[in-house]
Amino acid sequence: LPYSVADMREAFLEQHRRHLLRRERDGTPLPPIKVGFVSSGFNSKAVLYLSHDLFRFFDPELVEIHVFSTGAPDHPQFIRQTMRGVDWRQRVIDTVDYFHDVREFDGDHIALARFIHDKELQILIEWDGYARQGERAMGLMALRPCPVQILHQEFLATSGAQYVDYIVTDRVVSPVRLEGLYTEKFLYLPHHFFSKGHAVQAEVVPPKMEHVPKESSSAEFRLGVGSPQENACLASNPLGGNDQDEQAVSFVYCNFNKFLKNNPETMRSWIRILQNVPNSILCLLENPTEGIPNLRQFVNDVTAEEGNGDDDHDRDATTSPSNINARIHFLPWEKNPFDHQQRSHSLCNAMLDSHPYNGHTTAQDALYAGVPIVTRSDGDDMASRVTTSSNVILSLEELNAYNGIEEYENIAIRLGNDEEFFRSVRTKLIETCLQTNPMHPYWDVPRYVKNFEKGLVMVWENFLSGEKTDHVEVRDEDGWMEGGTTEEELVRREMKRRVMRKLRRLVVLDEYDKYNDKGEL
């Protein structure tokens, strides 16, 4: 160890030659490429929420899917109560060709590398990166269990390692001019590199063009009922004024990321946005609750500095520096991911993105709730460019602040003050969510998988050729469906996987029956 890439290439080349000869001799099709996914997050983690639907649509004639799960399943009570019976791990188990629970190798990356290597996989995809310290299989990739190794989805940055060959990305997130920031070569996907399954998950509710009005202003909050202005971040006194009958919330800005994603520069920017949009409020998550007093103190300090001794009595109560804090509110954490996603529709007019670490899962939740996102597009870090790429694909590039923080604030202020501009942006976004036959490319999971498969085939063929590893770009094909509607294509690809999976297991059982208990013919 580490395993030799040269030796693996020689062995796989010889195997490939034999398969080619069999195909020429009797028409036997080439076997699928064996692809592995390794992660500690095959449970109710964000990466599985976004990506478990991928496994429903891989073409079994092209790829054979192996999952190596280093993490534990969720507690049955959590699945039963919090998730209301939805078990993403079990969905993966029911879908993939082989699911390997490898917790027995916890802390032993050498044994895990040998176990994976013995499966003779061609490609290994990692979904942890440097996330989930203490759970992930640290040291595994360095031992080179597979000849082609890829970083995808969870950790949005370079590994900095020579043993990871590719990182899945797109041309907006990782333009070629930034290749010096990565040790990996780029595997470019079209229509955004980030997988998201919102449009094909029955539990995720698509957005509506119009909000269902509340029965009365005092009615208890219910998901899907009331506009963000009516629900006002569930605050009893959202503007902090004395006479609530004369005050109405004009616009609700949100950010549902952890506090650690937001730096002082970003927080100062949000304060200036609130100051320039009368009667607007900012809705954040209690994430964590221990940070709220510090954040409130920061807002007090900043607004006091910006006040410069001005007499607050000469200002409107909702725009005075001393009262901005009263317009910032905090929501409790919602454990159920589907309810959390739907809250965005009911509580948010627009999301203010974090910089330099964007919202990722929270951003996809917001977008599929019909909530536009204003983002800074002047960063070079991969994690800072995810929403920029989203807005480009969704034809919402007017929300990208390419010139930095001042433009970011101006776009957000315009959304809050220009009702026609906000309505046009929101309508355009919701139309992408509701589009069918075909689905909008941004939300189209089978299309994403087809392009992903194509990329895997390209990098594998490049490896076999002995050519130098270089950037690979997948080109999308119009009319990719075999015929019929999107719904028919969903059923067709999923059924094909299920049938092939059963056939493979029957073959394995047939081979097993040829041997006795001693392993003899």
Image: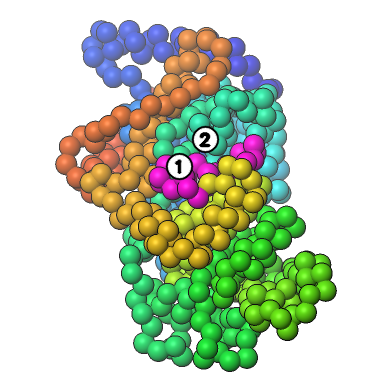
Residue 4 versus residue 318 in the image, above or below: above
Identity of the amino acid at label 2?
Val
Instruction: Name the image quarter holding the C terminus.
Output: top left
- Report the Cα–Cα distance between label 1 and label 2: 8 Å
Which is more N-terminal, label 2 or label 1?
2
Per the image, label 2 sits on a secondary structure element best described as loop
**Farthest front residue?**
314
Q: Can residue 189 be seen here?
A: yes
**Left or right of residue 305: residue 258:** left
Per the image, label 1 sits on a secondary structure element best described as helix
The residue closer to the viewer here, 412 or 170, is 412
Across and down, in percent, residue 510 comes to 31, 32
The residue closer to the viewer here, 168 or 347, is 347
Residue, disc 1: 392
Callout 1: few (<14), some (14-19), or many (20+) C-alpha neighbours within 10 Å? some
The residue closer to the viewer here, 307 or 7, is 307
Q: Who's the residue at 70% across and 61% down the image?
A: 267
Q: How is the image coloured?
A: rainbow
Across and down, in percent, residue 492 comes to 23, 42
Across and down, in percent, residue 218 comes to 46, 90
Residue 290 versus residue 57 in the image, above or below: below
- Which range is magenta? 377-399
Callout 2: few (<14), some (14-19), or many (20+) C-alpha neighbours within 10 Å? many
Residue 475 versus residue 237 in the image, above or below: above
The residue closer to the viewer here, 346 or 28, is 346
Q: Can residue 76 be seen here?
A: no
Q: Who's the residue at 71% across and 43% down the image?
A: 107
Q: Which mark is residue 167?
A: none
Residue, disc 2: 172
Q: Which of the 4 image quadrants contains residue 209? A: bottom left
Mark 1 touches mark 2? (CB < 8 Å): yes
